Image (cartoon, grey):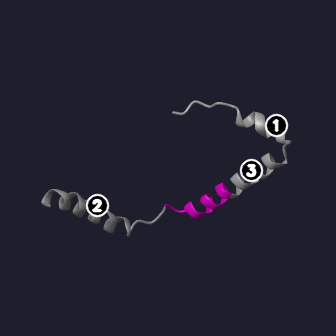
Amino acid sequence: MNEQSAPYQKVKKLIALKKFETPPPGHHDLLASKIISRLEVEQLRARDPWHRRWLQSLNFNPML
């Protein structure tokens, strides 16, 4: 049981430290603008005809 509790204690300490972290200045503004731009891109894609969206979905991108 000591073998399992040691990693648990390390994780518990790391989580306690994360509680005091703050994001860098401007993080929330940047996050909001990224979300809005992604929503706008999706709205523009939704305006495309169905056959164009279907062909774009067949575009195979390598997964890295």
Q: What secondary structure is marked by label 3? A: helix
Residue 25 at x, y percent in the picture: 53, 62
Q: Are marks 3 and 2 in contact (CB under 8 Å)?
A: no
Which label is found at residue 42? Answer: 3
In space, the residues marked 3 and 2 are separated at their CA atoms by 38 Å
**Kind of residue indicated by mark 1:** Arg
Q: Is residue 26 visible?
A: no
**At 74% across and 35% down in the image, what residue appears?**
56
Residue stretch rendered in magenta on the structure: 24-35
- Whether residue 16 sits left or right of residue 45 in the image: it is left
- Whether residue 39 sits left or right of residue 3 in the image: it is right
**Kind of residue indicated by mark 2:** Val
**Kind of residue indicated by mark 3:** Glu
Question: Which quadrant holds residue 32?
Answer: bottom right
Question: Is 26 one of the magenta-colored residues?
Answer: yes
- Whether residue 7 sits left or right of residue 59 in the image: it is left
**Of label 1 and label 3, which has the lower sequence position?**
3
Number of the front mark, 1 or 3:
1
Question: Is 48 one of the magenta-colored residues?
Answer: no
